[in-house]
Image: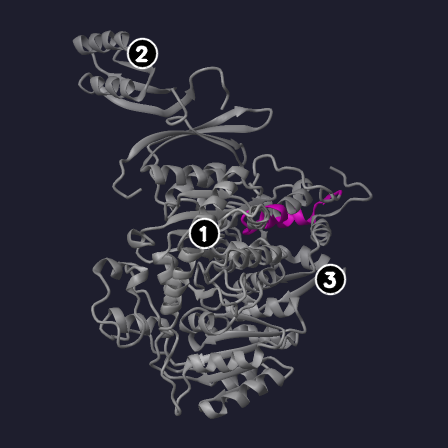
Amino acid sequence: MSKDTPVVAHTISVLVANEPGILARVVGLFSGRGYNIESLTVAETDAKQSLSRITIVTKGTPMIIEQIKAQLDRLVPVYRVRDLTVEGPHIERELALVKVRSTGEKRVEALRLADVFRAKVIDAKADSFVFEVTGNSDKVQTFVGLMETLGLVDVGRTGIVAMSRGGEPL
Amino acid sequence: MKPEESATTGADLLVKALIDEDVEVVFGYPGGAVLPIYDSLFKQNRLRHILVRHEQAAVHAAEGYARSTGKVGVVLVTSGPGATNAVTGLTDALMDSIPIVCLTGQVPTHLIGNDAFQEADTTGITRPCTKHNYLVKAVDALARTVHEAFYVARSGRPGPVVIDLPKDVLMNKYDYVAPPKVVSEHKSYRPQMKPDPKKVAQALEMIIHAKRPVFYAGGGVINSGPKASKLLTQLVHLTGYPITNTLMGLGSFPASDKQFLGMLGMHGTYEANLAMHGCDVMINIGARFDDRITGNIAKFSPGSKKIHVDIDPSSINKNVHVDLAVVGDATLVLEELVKGWKAREAKGQPKVDQKALKAWWAQIEEWRARNCLAYKSDKETIKPQYALERLYHHIKNKDHYITTEVGQHQMWAAQFLKFEQPNRWMTSGGLGTMGYGFPAAMGVQIAHPDALVIDVAGEASILMNIQELSTVAQYRLPVKIFILNNQYMGMVRQWQELLHGSRYSESYMESLPDFVKLAEAFGAKGLRCSEPSKLDDTIKEMIALPHPVVVDVLVDQKENCFPMIPSGAAHNEMLLGPDDKAGKVSEEGMVLV
């Protein structure tokens, strides 16, 4: 395998002990070894066993991706590392909060497009909306792009969470 | 919480936990945050504390102790500067996979984050330079954390573990928790020890059908324990194949054995590197395809099938893509390979292509006949190689351990001293830490009080931890420091000569101390030798003296270390000597270190 092999995005799920510093370990590993993080989400998913799930989207050649997984697996508080991209079909979702400030025709158009994208209005003022939109990153990005001409003032995105299809756990 | 009658302070719990982990020696330096621990140490006599003169030296001493015994080395330093001074040693231990538990003091929990006096974010700073680290926030977790830390440090691929101990945790009271009798499986950390039998069987097939094989064994064999070296030797003898060692692997196979090709890599032997380049099956056991070994990756051993045995899955395919990976402990893998080979033999199956093997050995002997370690001897000045040859002559029949600093002397030591057994050779391989050898030698001497322990040093490296002369004086450690003094940072000068037009920028050591007087100032013995004819007597005197001795050997200032694979070059593009250097370094190579 040479360095010319294609760079592909991979979505990796990491199950970790929810303890202080765990995120720093994971992020430090990426920065220290020069790997990319395209997206990162983390939250506790099992309070009883104190487990967190980290979803990382990263890019690299197959050799680099293998390294990333092996390096993650080597961290003491890491339970499991799964590469959803290679382990069969999976779904990815992202949530964004999108604040739009406009009046008149633009305001109406924003609301109409929100409907098309099945975005929910979660805050409304006379001259503004906050939309909640979920979907894959492409959809979220498209929606945000459309809002740019309609008074976009603020965006917050969660990054990607992902899960394999079918009944198997991580 | 009101402490119960039987409860003890965190510091006492810590000491008890260390004793239960079979710790005998702690290398350390006191300070405000660890005073409760020093008080606990004062009140007992099971644990011996060795007071170093700089925290970096404490870690290197623990490394020397660990590498020469196979046990976990233990370090105790205070918060802030104590911990930051230990960072170089921790990184060194991480790179060379040395099991260390380093206890660092910390400001009390309520002051953490307040920029308190002698506060540093120790777990933050040491996160990338340890295998794992802990901040103990409550005394109830202390004993358990210590036991877990020892398990993590010594199991799998060994490495340094830091336990950060806030002062209030050390003073609070709690009941002791003994280490688990059977090391129960850690929740998330489970190193793979046993290899996959299918992979072992495949490896055996590849080994049997090799026509131009070479074994390439590294520090993983040593870390796996002396049994791994025995099994490796057995397997190499059974197969009749050639073997080379990495710098960290020296001693895993007897150097005097005919099948041994010497060290490989940047300053490895001609025969070892060409065998690596020309082999058809490479059997890597416990080595990690380090850039000092491979040279130019694109040209590394182009025609070979590669087997990689390693306990650390992240070592597989990191630098070099291999054809077969066997993840597991070297001892267990070698055991299976030896067993498998013998089973084949018992069945009387046709095995190795002996004709091909014979031709391969004939080729290797041809390379060996180049005598790549030859040097021009001199009657007037001491050649560093000569000094090491004479040193080896006088120590080879004695129970001896060698440590080194980093640089030319280190490579010459690796080339000219012969290691017949594992755990006898302590050197900073991965990190290349100048100042490693002397404190490491102290650690070795503590573990082996009656052995001859020699730090082969350069005059530049030795100055990086020279303060430890005070430690060896205090504990009457008869460590010998054998300085090959060429008044240059030799390896820097060599690279400047080869790559930077002999512009010796800042590599000349002006104002060197008088090492003999320096030794005497610390209560050690100093010797000096500048004539080849007097070298033997000096070495004999050094060995005979029951004290710490500093030997200042004035060697040829201009001698360079050969053979050498220049940066960016391949194994078959070695420089064999000083007349062999014109235009060999590519621009790409210039960028490499």
> Which numbered marker is on residue A111?
none
Which residues are the magenta region? Answer: B150-175
How many marks on residues? Answer: 3
The nearer-to-camera label among 1 and 2 is 1
What residue do we see at 49% from left, 19% from top?
A168
Q: CA distance from mark 3 to mark 2?
A: 68 Å
In this rendering, position of residue B441 left or right of residue A37: right
Measured in 3D between alpha carbons, the distance from the residue under mark 1 to the one under mark 2, in whole angstroms, is 59 Å
- Looking at the image, can residue B257 be seen? yes
Looking at the picture, which amino acid does disc 1 mark? Ile
Mark 1 or 3, nearer chain start: 3
Relative horizontal placement of residue B367, taking residue B587 as reference (left or right): right
Quadrant for the N terminus of chain B, please: top right
On what subunit does the disc labeled 3 rest?
Answer: B
| Image disc number at residue A119 | 2
Query: At label 2, which amino acid type do we have?
Result: Ala
Q: Chain of mark 2?
A: A
**Is the Cβ of the residue at disc 1 closer than 8 Å to that at disc 2?**
no
**How many neighbours does mark 2 have within 10 angstroms: few (below 14), some (14-19), or many (20 or more)?**
many
Q: Is residue B447 left or right of residue B432?
A: right
In the image shown, does B220 or B572 lie closer to the viewer?
B572
Q: Nearer the viewer, residue B478 or A122?
A: B478
Locate the C terminus of chain B by quadrant. bottom left
Pointer 1 local density, CA inside 10 Å: few below 14, some 14–19, many at least 20: many
Q: The numbered mark 1 sits on a residue in which chain?
A: B
Residue B169 within the magenta-colored segment of the rendering:
yes
- What residue is disc 3 on? B42
Rendered view: B118 above or below B401: above
